[in-house]
Amino acid sequence: MEPNHNYFAHRYNQFEKELMNILDYIDISENWGDPCYQVGSIKLMDFCLNVCSEIETLFELIIRHPYFDPVEEVVEYRKDFMNIDQYRKGLNPIFKLEQYELFIPQIKKKIKPFEEFGDNGNPYWFRIYSPKKHKKHELIKEWTLKESVLALGGFLILCRHHPGIFRDSFKTRPPLSNNFFVWSDEVIGARIGEAFYWWNSDSYYKKYIRKDD
Protein backbone atom coordinates (compact mmCIF):
# COMPACT_ATOMS: atom_id res chain seq x y z
CA MET A 1 0.00 0.00 0.00
CA GLU A 2 1.39 3.39 -0.98
CA PRO A 3 2.10 5.92 1.78
CA ASN A 4 -0.82 8.34 2.02
CA HIS A 5 -0.73 11.99 2.93
CA ASN A 6 -1.16 11.17 6.61
CA TYR A 7 2.15 9.32 6.54
CA PHE A 8 4.09 12.18 4.96
CA ALA A 9 2.47 14.80 7.18
CA HIS A 10 3.43 12.74 10.21
CA ARG A 11 7.00 12.42 8.95
CA TYR A 12 7.25 16.15 8.27
CA ASN A 13 6.02 16.98 11.76
CA GLN A 14 8.58 14.56 13.21
CA PHE A 15 11.41 16.15 11.24
CA GLU A 16 10.39 19.69 12.13
CA LYS A 17 10.36 18.79 15.82
CA GLU A 18 13.77 17.16 15.45
CA LEU A 19 15.24 20.26 13.80
CA MET A 20 13.78 22.54 16.44
CA ASN A 21 15.32 20.35 19.15
CA ILE A 22 18.70 20.78 17.45
CA LEU A 23 18.14 24.55 17.33
CA ASP A 24 17.74 24.62 21.11
CA TYR A 25 21.56 24.47 21.12
CA ILE A 26 22.29 26.68 18.09
CA ASP A 27 21.36 30.35 17.76
CA ILE A 28 20.55 30.87 14.07
CA SER A 29 20.63 34.13 12.14
CA GLU A 30 19.39 35.62 8.86
CA ASN A 31 22.77 35.37 7.09
CA TRP A 32 23.58 32.00 5.52
CA GLY A 33 27.27 32.84 5.78
CA ASP A 34 27.26 33.01 9.57
CA PRO A 35 29.13 30.28 11.49
CA CYS A 36 25.92 28.79 12.90
CA TYR A 37 25.05 27.40 9.46
CA GLN A 38 28.45 25.79 8.93
CA VAL A 39 27.84 23.32 11.75
CA GLY A 40 27.93 19.67 10.75
CA SER A 41 27.42 16.58 12.89
CA ILE A 42 26.34 12.96 12.91
CA LYS A 43 22.92 14.17 14.05
CA LEU A 44 22.57 16.45 11.03
CA MET A 45 23.87 13.78 8.69
CA ASP A 46 21.19 11.39 9.94
CA PHE A 47 18.65 14.19 9.54
CA CYS A 48 19.78 14.58 5.93
CA LEU A 49 19.38 10.90 5.14
CA ASN A 50 15.93 10.70 6.71
CA VAL A 51 14.49 13.85 5.13
CA CYS A 52 16.00 13.42 1.67
CA SER A 53 14.99 9.76 1.41
CA GLU A 54 11.39 10.79 2.11
CA ILE A 55 11.71 13.50 -0.55
CA GLU A 56 12.79 10.87 -3.08
CA THR A 57 9.95 8.58 -2.01
CA LEU A 58 7.35 11.33 -2.35
CA PHE A 59 8.67 12.53 -5.71
CA GLU A 60 8.40 9.02 -7.11
CA LEU A 61 4.93 8.49 -5.65
CA ILE A 62 3.71 11.71 -7.27
CA ILE A 63 5.21 11.10 -10.71
CA ARG A 64 3.87 7.52 -10.81
CA HIS A 65 0.42 8.41 -9.53
CA PRO A 66 -2.46 7.28 -11.80
CA TYR A 67 -3.57 10.90 -12.12
CA PHE A 68 -0.61 11.37 -14.45
CA ASP A 69 -1.19 8.26 -16.55
CA PRO A 70 -2.86 10.25 -19.36
CA VAL A 71 -0.18 12.96 -19.30
CA GLU A 72 2.44 12.02 -21.87
CA GLU A 73 4.75 14.82 -20.78
CA VAL A 74 4.98 13.17 -17.35
CA VAL A 75 4.84 9.50 -18.34
CA GLU A 76 7.86 9.82 -20.61
CA TYR A 77 10.03 10.53 -17.56
CA ARG A 78 8.94 7.46 -15.61
CA LYS A 79 11.93 5.11 -15.49
CA ASP A 80 12.78 1.90 -13.69
CA PHE A 81 15.39 3.82 -11.72
CA MET A 82 14.24 7.35 -10.99
CA ASN A 83 16.36 10.34 -10.10
CA ILE A 84 15.95 14.04 -9.45
CA ASP A 85 16.37 14.88 -13.14
CA GLN A 86 13.28 12.88 -14.10
CA TYR A 87 11.28 14.39 -11.25
CA ARG A 88 12.26 17.91 -12.30
CA LYS A 89 11.58 17.40 -16.01
CA GLY A 90 8.34 15.51 -15.51
CA LEU A 91 6.71 17.45 -12.68
CA ASN A 92 8.12 20.94 -12.57
CA PRO A 93 6.47 22.19 -15.77
CA ILE A 94 3.17 21.52 -13.96
CA PHE A 95 3.97 22.50 -10.38
CA LYS A 96 6.70 25.16 -10.88
CA LEU A 97 8.28 24.28 -7.55
CA GLU A 98 10.95 26.96 -7.93
CA GLN A 99 8.29 29.59 -7.22
CA TYR A 100 7.40 28.28 -3.79
CA GLU A 101 8.67 30.46 -1.00
CA LEU A 102 8.74 29.78 2.73
CA PHE A 103 9.28 32.27 5.52
CA ILE A 104 11.17 31.56 8.75
CA PRO A 105 9.70 34.00 11.31
CA GLN A 106 12.41 33.29 13.89
CA ILE A 107 15.03 34.95 11.69
CA LYS A 108 12.76 36.85 9.26
CA LYS A 109 14.19 35.01 6.28
CA LYS A 110 12.59 33.75 3.05
CA ILE A 111 13.83 30.62 1.30
CA LYS A 112 13.08 28.87 -2.00
CA PRO A 113 14.27 25.26 -1.58
CA PHE A 114 13.73 24.36 -5.25
CA GLU A 115 14.93 27.65 -6.72
CA GLU A 116 17.44 25.95 -9.05
CA PHE A 117 14.60 24.12 -10.80
CA GLY A 118 13.85 27.43 -12.51
CA ASP A 119 17.17 27.22 -14.35
CA ASN A 120 16.74 23.51 -15.16
CA GLY A 121 19.16 22.64 -12.37
CA ASN A 122 18.82 20.69 -9.15
CA PRO A 123 18.92 22.11 -5.61
CA TYR A 124 22.47 22.24 -4.36
CA TRP A 125 21.48 20.61 -1.07
CA PHE A 126 20.16 17.62 -3.02
CA ARG A 127 23.36 17.54 -5.08
CA ILE A 128 25.27 17.12 -1.81
CA TYR A 129 23.00 14.35 -0.58
CA SER A 130 22.47 12.25 -3.69
CA PRO A 131 26.00 11.14 -4.63
CA LYS A 132 27.05 10.69 -1.01
CA LYS A 133 24.02 9.03 0.59
CA HIS A 134 25.90 5.72 0.63
CA LYS A 135 29.19 7.39 1.61
CA LYS A 136 28.50 8.76 5.05
CA HIS A 137 32.16 9.49 5.71
CA GLU A 138 31.97 12.04 2.87
CA LEU A 139 28.44 13.29 3.49
CA ILE A 140 29.20 14.28 7.08
CA LYS A 141 31.94 16.62 5.84
CA GLU A 142 29.61 18.60 3.58
CA TRP A 143 26.11 18.50 5.03
CA THR A 144 25.46 21.35 7.46
CA LEU A 145 22.63 23.09 9.25
CA LYS A 146 21.99 25.27 6.20
CA GLU A 147 21.27 22.27 3.98
CA SER A 148 19.09 20.79 6.72
CA VAL A 149 16.85 23.86 6.77
CA LEU A 150 16.52 23.92 2.98
CA ALA A 151 15.82 20.18 2.73
CA LEU A 152 13.11 20.36 5.39
CA GLY A 153 11.52 23.25 3.49
CA GLY A 154 11.65 21.22 0.30
CA PHE A 155 9.92 18.31 1.99
CA LEU A 156 7.17 20.59 3.30
CA ILE A 157 6.52 21.91 -0.21
CA LEU A 158 6.30 18.38 -1.61
CA CYS A 159 3.91 17.32 1.14
CA ARG A 160 1.53 19.93 -0.25
CA HIS A 161 1.63 18.10 -3.58
CA HIS A 162 0.72 14.62 -2.44
CA PRO A 163 -2.21 13.69 -4.71
CA GLY A 164 -4.37 12.80 -1.73
CA ILE A 165 -4.26 16.25 -0.21
CA PHE A 166 -6.61 17.71 -2.80
CA ARG A 167 -9.04 14.79 -2.82
CA ASP A 168 -9.49 14.75 0.96
CA SER A 169 -11.61 17.31 2.71
CA PHE A 170 -9.84 20.03 4.64
CA LYS A 171 -11.40 18.71 7.84
CA THR A 172 -9.88 15.24 7.50
CA ARG A 173 -6.37 16.25 6.49
CA PRO A 174 -3.67 15.83 9.11
CA PRO A 175 -2.15 19.21 9.90
CA LEU A 176 1.31 20.12 8.73
CA SER A 177 3.02 21.92 11.57
CA ASN A 178 3.97 25.57 11.09
CA ASN A 179 6.19 25.99 14.11
CA PHE A 180 9.27 26.69 11.99
CA PHE A 181 8.11 27.66 8.49
CA VAL A 182 5.12 29.65 7.33
CA TRP A 183 4.07 30.00 3.73
CA SER A 184 4.95 33.23 1.97
CA ASP A 185 1.72 35.01 1.06
CA GLU A 186 3.32 36.33 -2.12
CA VAL A 187 3.35 32.90 -3.72
CA ILE A 188 1.56 30.22 -1.79
CA GLY A 189 -2.03 31.27 -2.36
CA ALA A 190 -1.65 31.36 -6.12
CA ARG A 191 0.49 28.25 -6.47
CA ILE A 192 -1.51 26.02 -4.13
CA GLY A 193 -4.68 27.30 -5.75
CA GLU A 194 -3.36 26.31 -9.17
CA ALA A 195 -2.33 22.88 -7.93
CA PHE A 196 -5.75 22.36 -6.37
CA TYR A 197 -7.39 23.43 -9.61
CA TRP A 198 -5.15 21.15 -11.66
CA TRP A 199 -5.94 18.04 -9.62
CA ASN A 200 -9.67 18.65 -9.45
CA SER A 201 -10.87 20.69 -12.39
CA ASP A 202 -12.71 19.57 -15.49
CA SER A 203 -9.85 21.07 -17.47
CA TYR A 204 -7.61 18.19 -16.42
CA TYR A 205 -10.07 15.60 -17.62
CA LYS A 206 -10.90 17.46 -20.81
CA LYS A 207 -7.24 17.84 -21.69
CA TYR A 208 -5.94 14.41 -20.74
CA ILE A 209 -8.89 12.03 -20.64
CA ARG A 210 -11.80 13.31 -22.73
CA LYS A 211 -9.65 14.76 -25.49
CA ASP A 212 -12.50 14.65 -27.96
CA ASP A 213 -14.71 16.95 -25.84
Image (cartoon, rainbow, N blue to C red):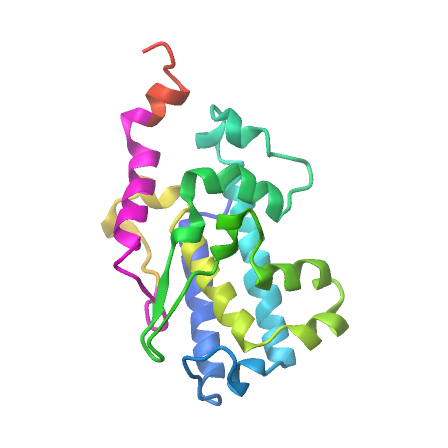
**Relative image position of residue 150 (x, y in whole percent):** 49, 66
184 falls in the magenta region: yes
Q: Is residue 1 visible?
A: no
Is 76 displayed left or right of 173 in the figure?
Answer: right
**Relative image position of residue 83 (x, y in whole percent):** 64, 46
**Which residue lies at the image location 55% right of the left edge and 39% below the top edge?**
89
- Magenta-colored span: 177-203
Is 88 displayed left or right of 27 in the figure?
Answer: right
**Which residue lies at the image location 31% right of the left edge and 11% below the top edge?**
213
**Relative image position of residue 101 (x, y in whole percent):** 37, 59
Question: Which residue of the protein is positioned furthest toward the top in this rendering?
Answer: 212
182 falls in the magenta region: yes
Res 200 quadrant in image: top left
Is 13 displayed left or right of 42 in the figure?
Answer: left
Q: Is residue 116 visible?
A: yes
**Which residue lies at the image location 75% right of the left edge and 71% below the top edge?**
138
**Which residue lies at the image location 64% right of the left edge and 59% below the top edge?**
127
In this rendering, is residue 148 above or below 176?
below
**Relative image position of residue 202 (x, y in whole percent):** 28, 25
In this rendering, is residue 79 above or below 49?
above
- Marker count (numbered): 0
**Residue nearer the viewer, 4 or 152:** 152
Question: Which residue of the protein is positioned furthest toward the left in this rendering?
Answer: 171
